[in-house]
Image (tube, grey):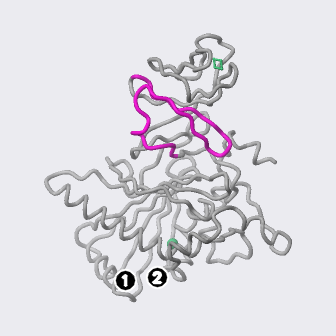
Amino acid sequence: MLKDSEIKKVSKDDHPRKENVVSQPLNHQPIFNEPHLITESWYPVCPASTLKDSETRSFTLLQHRFVVWRGKSGKLYAMDSFCPHMGADLGNGNVIGENLQCYFHHWTFLPGGKCANHKEANNTSYPVEEKYGFIWIYPGATPSHSIPQPPGLLNQEVESLYLKKLKLYAHHHVMMAGGIDLQHFKSVHKVDIKFDYQVTEHEKHVHIWNLSGVLPTGSWLLNFTRWLTGGEFKYQALFAGGSIVSLTYGNDLKFRGRGFSLPTVSILWAGRPTSDGVSEVDIFIVQPKFKGVLAPLKKIASTLFSVILLAALRDDDTKAFPHMRFNIGLTTEGDKSVMDLVDRINLLTVSSWTKDSHEK
Ligand code: FES
Ligand SMILES: [Fe+2]
């Protein structure tokens, strides 16, 4: 495992993509691992509490600047940042009721982007929502899917805990593939499970992978988990739109294989490419909304479980990313699950925000 001090020394930009281009050329994919484009999906913008009622601010996602504002009612709206009059940043404007007024010459825009002063000066608006204590933007006209809940907590009331923003040393698609890279469980995590998986479509551009296998004996942790679950281990991975992956560990598991249902752990990662060619990811722990007198205790136990699991996985995986230049070379039968995900991501829709950079 690399120490934090060692990680600081390794590449934090896209240099590996530009290295060895003659002897080891990159096999570009249409979408997967391509740092200059984003797919139509949900992307976290900022913590919801940092944009108060009647406030406006602009943000960027790669080379696209958009403005988000909260009306007097608290409702969120988003559109392209530059005023159609002379290009002032509408993030410097004023919110009047639910509308956004440009600072420069006071042209006013309605929530859908229509200009109240000149009907030829409409602006393009975008879907924006609040979930998990964050504001999320969708860089397309109409969302093909909702901001997902973890696969083990679908249709449940949930609450979340924001852990942190992490700079990745690889594209976030590569990190997503780690969740279903069945071979690395043995090589990196030292857990030799032969997983079977099945993929179902949950919504357009949202797929759930159901993985199950039999736990081997080994470390005390493995042996304990084996005892606890009766030997089986299941988890689910949900991939949404190429920007979000959420894992639920232990879904449908019973104590000793037949008793009461064991608690699950659900984590959600939302990634976005950064202009230096790598990615950053916001990490959330998502839990069912615990009820009753034991709710605070259950919440503490669930949080503790999640943090321990995350720390264990991160420590093992840390060394895989530095200098990672994901490139599909010779693949084998064991890489089927990864290739399956690569193919699915390549079928997503590229956002118009980055279409130009994709074609160049
Ligand atoms: S630049 Fe916005 S109103 Fe003139
Ligand atoms: Fe891993």
Q: Is residue 114 above or below residue 259?
A: above
Write the residue at 44% across / 62% down: 247
Q: Quadrant of ligand 1?
A: top right
Quadrant of res 19: bottom right
Write the residue at 54% across / 31% down: 78
Of callouts 1 and 2, which one flags the residue occurring earlier in the amino acid sequence?
2
Which residue bears the numbered disc 2?
191
Give x and y (percent) for residue 12.
63, 64
Q: Are marks 1 and 2 in contact (CB under 8 Å)?
A: yes
Classify residue 238 as left or right of residue 19. left
Classify residue 270 as left or right of residue 225. right
- In the rendered structure, does residue 70 fall within the stretch colored magenta? yes
* Amino acid type, mark 1: Leu
- In the rendered structure, does residue 258 fall within the stretch colored magenta? no
Judging from the image, what secondary structure is the residue with disc 2 in?
A: loop
Magenta stretch bounds: 44-72
Judging from the image, what secondary structure is the residue with disc 1 in?
A: helix
Give x and y (percent) for residue 287.
33, 55
Give x and y (percent) for residue 116.
58, 12
Which numbered tag is attached to residue 261?
none
Write the residue at 68% across / 42% down: 63
Which residue bears the numbered disc 1?
222
Quadrant of res 42: top right
Q: Going by the picture, which residue comes out furthest to the top?
A: 117
Spatial separation of the CA atoms under disc 1 and disc 2: 8 Å
Q: Is residue 250 above or below residue 244?
A: below
> In the depicted view, which residue is nearer to us: 189 or 53?
53
The crowd level at tag 2 (other Cα within 10 Å; few <14, some 14-19, many 20+) is: some
* Amino acid type, mark 2: Val
Give x and y (percent) for residue 220.
33, 86
Q: Going by the picture, which residue comes out furthest to the bottom?
A: 218
